[in-house]
Amino acid sequence: MIHIQQLKYKYPKGIEISFPDFEIKSGEEILILGASGCGKTTLLHVLGGLLPVTSGKVIINDIDITLLKGNKIDQFRGENIGVIFQKPHFARALTLHENLAFAQKAAGRKVDHKRIHHLLDRLGISQHIDKSPSKMSEGEKQRMSVAMALINKPALLLADEPTASLDDEHANEVIQLLREMASEENSALVIVTHDSRLKEAFAERTLTLSKLH
Amino acid sequence: MNIFKFAWKNLWHKSLNTSLNLILFAFGVSIISALLLTQDYFEKTLKKNQAGIGMVVGAKGSPLQLILCAIYQVDTPTGNIRLSETKKLKKHPLVAKAIPQSLGDSYKGYRIVGTTHEYPELYKAEIAEGKMFDENKSLEVTVGAAVAKKIGLKIGDDFHSAHGIGEGGHDHDHEHFKVVGILKPTGTVIDQLLLTSLSSIWDVHQHEKPSKANFGNLSDKKVEKEADEKEITNLLIKFRNPMGAITLPRMVNEQTSMQAASPAYETSRLLSLLGDAITALKALAIAIMVVSGLSIFISLYNSLKERKYELAYLRSLGTPQSYIFSLLLIEGLICAFMGFAIGMILSHGSIYIAATQIDTLSALNIGGTAFNSGEIILFASTLGIGFLASVIPAIQAARTNISQALSE
């Protein structure tokens, strides 16, 4: 269960932003929609423990991550949160298998080769297992970033603008994939986007952020 | 993944950058290492070959030339001295040993030294095969280990000596030297010599035209002189006590027509001359190493811009700051370590190859297989430069603002 309560973040330039309260259960999903500059990515980074908040709580599995500092938040993030960034990033010198093994080790877990193979198979990129991610197509890289985010079976899966540069067909494919994978792993899925095409698909659970003033 | 393996993979992901850094580092290390080795070999060999000789007496001329010729067998003699004049010196109470040398001939570029058994004893030379030349017989030769190996001389072989100390002198074809013994290797100059009795040299040159004998220093009159007026090239003196070093050189230089030179003094003079050149080269090599350190720094620092997203992403996976810091530091240290290793292989390898090709180096016992204690300091300095070059990029990488980096 994930609870977001009275969350506020103050930008270095002094502007403070408040986010609406919401909660999501394991296996559920929410779409956070908003125009560019409304603080969507900021919210995603706060939820991912990548940015410290001014006030409020982000409770994931009964732990308020806003209270965690230093290595503790790193460790918590590795174990419980998976993030799919707008642009896929990997360790370029490592193969797909090594990247996924690295993510497992970074979360303090043992390398689970079976899980690595399972995820790559499920995402249809197992043929690239011993290649560098830089040798894959953009679509394959995006699938790989899904695999990286899910490798440690996170309680919370965050996706930042996953359909930003995709046409309708590919956008639907990606959203379908995220939903399926999050559901299979029983992760709570939070998607932040400005892509109003997704509004229909998440009609039941959409939160709209208003533009900052 | 093991952090060292990850650092290694990162380095070779940018193989051109890494290779250039390594070449630069290895170049600096190899120059310093080669200088250290050469200087060390040179000093040790000079000292070893002195073998406790306190003074060399020879004809007047350059004292350094006299030392280089009499002890290290690398220069031409300053001239000859009368054997009769040296007899007084031999009997002096402060002289423990006075070993005569008669030089001037060679065989295939290796010097033939007319002397007594005291000369090989000075270098603790032992017979490997055959026997030592007979001091009272003419034309018997005992061959140094390196000469025997290089030109393949065996017991029973005979040869004509050639006039002069280099190849190309005319042959003394009226006399045949006979090999009666081969010495064990000593690691000293004696390995490069052919030893014979004094009388052998005199006998060979009795048949000579007066103007050509002993580097042209024997005049018509000299060749015709009686036995007690025979000449030698120089006399190696070992003192009975340190008082000899104080009184005897002055006595020889002031009261005789001969010259006395001190091996210790002349050698240190030679080393100080070489020392300046070596210091200048070392400074150049240190500058190269510092430049290569700067290059590693610039390379790591610039790569941070490219790797900012990657490193921030690794942090987002839960990787602690300390891991990122260590990763960058290890990359710099691996570069430095490899630069050191390649530099050492280059310096030792090239000296080894040069020693097998150039006789002068093997004569100086320079081989490239031994290590120098200064190389430990060089190793520490190399790692120090690698550390300094990578610590600032490592700190910056560890402090990367994950959110900011991944939002750009």
Image: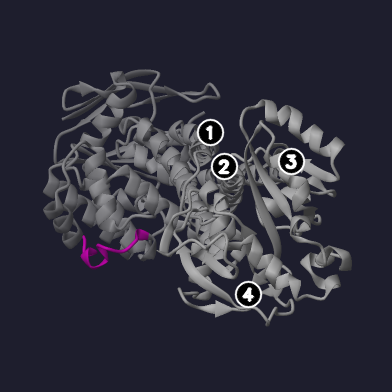
Residue B377 coordinates in the image, percent (x, y): 52, 36
Instruction: Please name which of the two marks, 4 or 2, marks the residue nearer to the observer.
Output: 4
Name which residue type carries label 3.
Lys
> Mark 2 — on which chain does it sit?
B
Q: Are marks 2 and 1 in contact (CB under 8 Å)?
A: yes
Q: What's drawn in magenta, residue-wise?
A: A123-133
Which residue is tagged 4?
Answer: B108
Q: Main secondary structure of the magenta part?
A: loop
Residue at image point 38% right, 55% down: A93
Structure colour scheme: one colour
Mark 2 or 3 closer to N-term? 3
Q: Is residue A127 magenta?
A: yes
Q: Is residue B402 left or right of residue B296?
A: left
Instruction: Please name which of the two marks, 1 or 4, marks the residue nearer to the observer.
Output: 4
Mark 3 or 4 closer to N-term? 3
Do marks 3 and 4 share a subunit? yes
B271 and B78: which one is in front?
Answer: B78
Q: Are marks 1 and 4 in contact (CB under 8 Å)?
A: no
Label 2 to label 3: alpha-carbon separation: 70 Å
* SS at circle 2: helix
Which residue is tagged 2?
Answer: B297
Mark 3 or 1 closer to N-term? 3
- The disc placed on residue B392 is 1
Tell me if mark 1 has few (under 14), some (14-19) or many (20+) residues whose alpha carbon lies within 10 angstroms of its own: some
> Mark 1 — on which chain does it sit?
B
Label 3 to label 4: alpha-carbon separation: 36 Å
Which residue is tagged 3?
Answer: B88
Q: Is residue B68 left or right of residue B125?
A: right
Mark 2 or 1 closer to N-term? 2
Tell me if mark 3 has few (under 14), some (14-19) or many (20+) residues whose alpha carbon lies within 10 angstroms of its own: few
Tell me if mark 2 has few (under 14), some (14-19) or many (20+) residues whose alpha carbon lies within 10 angstroms of its own: many
Tell me if mark 4 has few (under 14), some (14-19) or many (20+) residues whose alpha carbon lies within 10 angstroms of its own: some
